[in-house]
Image (cartoon, rainbow, N blue to C red):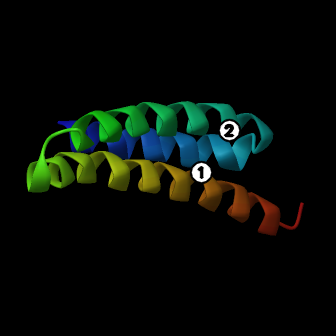
Amino acid sequence: MIIVGIVAVCVVLLVLAFLLPRFSRHPQNGTQRTLGAGARAGGKAPGILGRLLQKPFSSSSRAVGRSGSAGRRARSRMPF
């Protein structure tokens, strides 16, 4: 269920970054900030468990960043 949510957020940010590149930064940063808080909270667990709990949040944050930048990059390559 969480995977579907992250995918939905990535798609929304991709479309938003393509249509309104300047206004897509704030939602992207907010989403990455929220996922970063989850990663920090998961990382407080001891040892290997901390790294295992931190990884889904950090990889989701990376995916959100990539989708936003991909939308802005595609928009900049358009001829109009």
18 to 16, vertically: above or below? below
Q: Residues within 10 Å of mark 2 (few under 14, many from 20)?
A: many
Image x and y of residue 70, in percent: 61, 61
Q: Which residue is mark 1?
A: 68
Image x and y of residue 10, in percent: 45, 46
The amino acid on which the numbered mark 1 sits, given as a three-letter code, is: Gly
Q: Nearer the viewer, residue 22 or 48?
A: 48
Q: Who's the residue at 47% across and 46% down the image? A: 11
Q: Residues within 10 Å of mark 1 (few under 14, many from 20)?
A: many
The quadrant of the picture occupied by the N terminus is top left
In the figure, is residue 56 to the left or right of 67? left
The amino acid on which the numbered mark 2 sits, given as a three-letter code, is: Ser
Q: Who's the residue at 15% across and 53% down the image? A: 52
Cα distance, mark 1 to mark 2?
7 Å
Q: Which residue is mark 2?
A: 24
The quadrant of the picture occupied by the C terminus is bottom right
Give the SS element for disc 1: helix
Image x and y of residue 36, in percent: 42, 39
Mark number, residue 78: none
Q: Who's the residue at 48% across and 49% down the image? A: 64
Q: Nearer the viewer, residue 35 or 17?
A: 35
In the figure, is residue 53 to the left or right of 70? left
In the figure, is residue 49 to the left or right of 76? left
In the figure, is residue 68 to the left or right of 44? right
Q: Quadrant of residue 42?
A: top left
Q: Earlier in the sequence, mark 1 or mark 2?
A: 2
71 to 13, vertically: above or below? below
Whether residues under marks 1 and 2 lie with C-beta atoms below 8 angstroms apart, the answer is yes
